[in-house]
């Protein structure tokens, strides 16, 4: 039999669940048949099957899972944890650094997490790039942030930080605050050195400057260019107008959000989540808040659930309006983006009336929302629902059915479902290939199973279908919002739980214990039970997840943020190599990227 360890504090478990015996997941049984006695099973709060394997068995286990009859076809995430200061590990294998692989199976509609323990004096893991191509960037990020080497990696270099950077920021000894560093200075010599290190050298990437009969041109797009949709640099190797190869260069928007989570309380980190996908608003807060609530054992009231769903769908609409407007603009249509900004402002008027803010409301709270819906919110929502459908019809008729736009986008930047899954593509980019996978339907959360809506799909996997899926997503969001408005439950907007932050104001003013709890929670921060938890949501751009490790403290021990843009940009060379420069622009326009979502 395999060894099983419990990584949940029994004193913090729900008494109703303590005595329940849950069936062994099928993937654990399958691993037991082939690797009996060679792995350790860890129980986590999120109940994702989590298995520790030896480094020597790692690639064999990963390949086995990839080739099962119902395979774990997607490498959803890959990162690491510096375990050296962690106190509450409840018998887990000895590990200074842990590398974890989050695998997803769509046929099973389930996940598995594989972990490898490493000692500080031997930080080396075999690369998984031959099993999943998207392991490339994830492994580079782990080396960049932790200094863990992946042997056999094709190009193990820094990815989020410049190549002259010293140290690995997500190690525990690395400072978390700017005030802990020596003052920054920049003289002419240092500036010249840093600029020289930004120079693109083709040979470092295995590129040739010339072929048999031609010299190649290397074209920089960005890192400040309107078609790059943010601080993003794309280096194209060109033979005339044809893209021979390309190198997406990211990291210009990196702010260290995962490091910040280690020095902010569970409550005070909420505003930082808004700035990940800065167009997603409360949609960024949702997976983080839900993970913390699972750790704390908080069940939120039905009214809070419905409010969260309604506001999340409002932000899906504002995001998609901007996406469609800039998509048309990149294809040469200049007018529609201005109309779409006007409609977007109408949505923001509702968001501002409800939350008090527009783009970054930081409005969801641990246990519910910051406050209840204001008086008259139904009228504002109803006016928007009456306004928006006919506008979407006009955009489709006037712009998206235009023959010039279709000529620029149909059959362009095309990929199929198999390729999308191999590169970790989710959201509209995956559904445009004909696969109707939407987490709100496949694994309902926040009561989405109670809403009547459809999953928009395309069938060509090209730039045009990705845009049309986004248009239909907005129609479905309008349906969901109307159902929220018509069926808004009565009752509290926040859970009555000691770890809900902050406690209800009416009780704070009348109950001394609640007043003390308020003071401690806001100033010092709530102490969350030890454990690990991942929550995934269907965000504006694809699947977004927060994997949180608590060490029974007021702050997160490790917060891993998995974002869709990181995966989508990595796929770019496999899609556009062999096409034209104009097609590369349309690819960027069609995958709905935000660089803060990529770099974090």
Image (cartoon, rainbow, N blue to C red):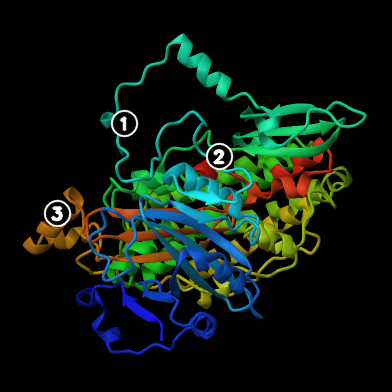
The reply, left or right, for residue 243 in relation to residue 124 is right
Q: Position of residue 459 (x, y in %)?
A: 79, 64
**395 over 339 or under it: above or below:** below
Comparing marks 3 and 2, which lies closer to the viewer? 2
Secondary element at image label 3: helix
Q: Which mark is residue 520?
A: 3
Other-residue count near label 1 (Cα within 10 Å), few / some / many at <14 / 14–19 / ≥20:
few
Q: Tell which of 555 and 475 is nearer to you.
A: 555
User: Which residue is situated farthest in the right direction here?
Assistant: 213
Residue under the image location 37 percent in, 17 percent down: 185
Residue under the image location 67 percent in, 27 percent down: 201
| Alpha carbon distance from label 3 to label 1 | 26 Å
Q: Tell which of 214 and 184 is nearer to you.
A: 214
Does any portion of residue 600 appear in the rendered image? no
Query: Sequence-wise, which precedes: disc 1 or disc 2?
Result: 2
Pick the quarter of the image with the N terminus: bottom left
Query: Sequence-wise, which precedes: disc 3 or disc 1?
Result: 1
The answer to which quarter of the image holds residue 460 is: bottom right
| Alpha carbon distance from label 3 to label 2 | 44 Å
The answer to which quarter of the image holds residue 92 is: bottom left
Determine which residue is flagged by label 2: 157
Q: Which mark is residue 178?
A: 1
Does any portion of residue 57 appear in the rendered image? yes
Q: Position of residue 5 (x, y in %)?
A: 32, 76
Q: Position of residue 440 (x, y in %)?
A: 55, 69
Residue under the image location 87 percent in, 30 percent down: 240
Other-residue count near label 2 (Cα within 10 Å), few / some / many at <14 / 14–19 / ≥20:
some
Secondary element at image label 2: loop
| Alpha carbon distance from label 1 to label 2 | 25 Å
The reply, left or right, for residue 281 in relation to residue 336 is left
């Amino acid at each position: 039999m395999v060894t099983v360890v419990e990584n949940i504090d029994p004193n913090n478990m729900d008494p109703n669940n303590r005595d329940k015996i849950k069936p062994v997941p099928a993937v654990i049984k399958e691993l037991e048949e082939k690797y009996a006695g060679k792995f350790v099973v860890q129980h986590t709060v999120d109940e994702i099957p989590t298995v520790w394997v030896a480094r020597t068995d790692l690639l064999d286990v990963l390949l086995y899972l990839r080739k099962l009859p119902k395979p774990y076809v997607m490498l959803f995430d890959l990162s690491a944890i510096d375990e050296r200061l962690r106190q509450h590990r409840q018998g887990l294998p000895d590990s200074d650094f842990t590398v974890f692989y989050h695998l997803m199976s769509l046929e099973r509609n389930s996940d598995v997490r594989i972990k490898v323990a490493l000692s500080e004096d031997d930080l080396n893991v075999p690369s998984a790039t031959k099993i999943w191509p998207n392991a490339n960037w994830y492994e580079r990020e782990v080396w960049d942030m932790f200094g863990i080497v992946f042997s056999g990696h094709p190009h193990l270099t820094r990815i989020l930080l410049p190549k002259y950077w010293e140290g690995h920021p997500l190690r525990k000894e690395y400072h978390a605050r700017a005030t802990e560093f020596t003052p920054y200075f920049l003289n002419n010599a240092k500036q010249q050195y840093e600029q020289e290190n930004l120079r693109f050298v083709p040979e470092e990437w295995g590129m040739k400057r010339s072929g048999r009969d031609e010299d190649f041109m290397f074209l920089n797009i960005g890192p400040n260019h309107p078609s790059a949709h943010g601080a993003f640099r794309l280096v194209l190797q060109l033979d005339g107008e044809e893209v021979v190869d390309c190198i997406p260069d990211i990291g210009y928007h990196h702010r260290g959000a995962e490091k910040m989570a280690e020095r902010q309380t569970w409550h005070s980190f909420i505003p930082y989540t808004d700035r990940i996908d800065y167009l997603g608003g409360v949609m960024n807060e949702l997976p983080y808040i839900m993970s913390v609530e699972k750790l704390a054992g908080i069940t939120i009231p039905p009214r809070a659930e419905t409010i969260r769903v309604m506001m999340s769908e409002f932000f899906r609409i504002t995001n998609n309006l901007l996406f469609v407007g800039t998509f048309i603009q990149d294809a040469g249509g200049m007018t529609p983006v201005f109309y779409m900004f006007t409609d977007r402002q109408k949505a923001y008027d509702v968001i501002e009336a409800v939350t008090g803010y527009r783009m970054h409301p930081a409005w969801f709270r641990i246990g519910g929302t910051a406050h209840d819906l204001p008086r008259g919110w139904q009228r504002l929502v109803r006016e928007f629902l009456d306004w928006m459908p006919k506008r979407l019809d006009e955009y489709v008729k006037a712009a998206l059915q235009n023959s010039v736009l279709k000529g620029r986008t149909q059959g362009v930047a095309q990929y199929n479902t198999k390729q999308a899954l191999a590169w970790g593509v989710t959201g509209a980019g995956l559904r445009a290939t004909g696969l109707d996978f939407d987490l709100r339907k496949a694994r309902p959360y926040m009561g989405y199973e109670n809403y009547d809506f459809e999953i928009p799909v395309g069938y060509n996997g090209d730039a045009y279908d990705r845009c049309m899926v986004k248009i239909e997503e907005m129609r479905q969001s309008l349906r969901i919002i109307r159902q929220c408005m018509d069926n808004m439950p009565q009752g509290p907007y926040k859970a009555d739980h000691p770890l809900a932050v902050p406690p209800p104001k009416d009780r704070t003013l009348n109950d001394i214990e609640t007043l003390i709890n308020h003071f401690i929670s806001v100033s010092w921060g709530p102490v969350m039970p030890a454990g690990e938890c991942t929550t995934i949501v269907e965000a504006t751009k694809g699947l977004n997840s927060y994997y949180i490790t608590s060490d029974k403290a007021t702050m997160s021990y490790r917060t891993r943020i998995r974002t869709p843009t990181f995966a989508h940009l990595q796929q770019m060379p496999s899609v556009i190599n062999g096409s034209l420069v104009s097609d590369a622009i349309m690819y960027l326009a069609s995958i709905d990227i935000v660089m803060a979502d990529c770099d974090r």
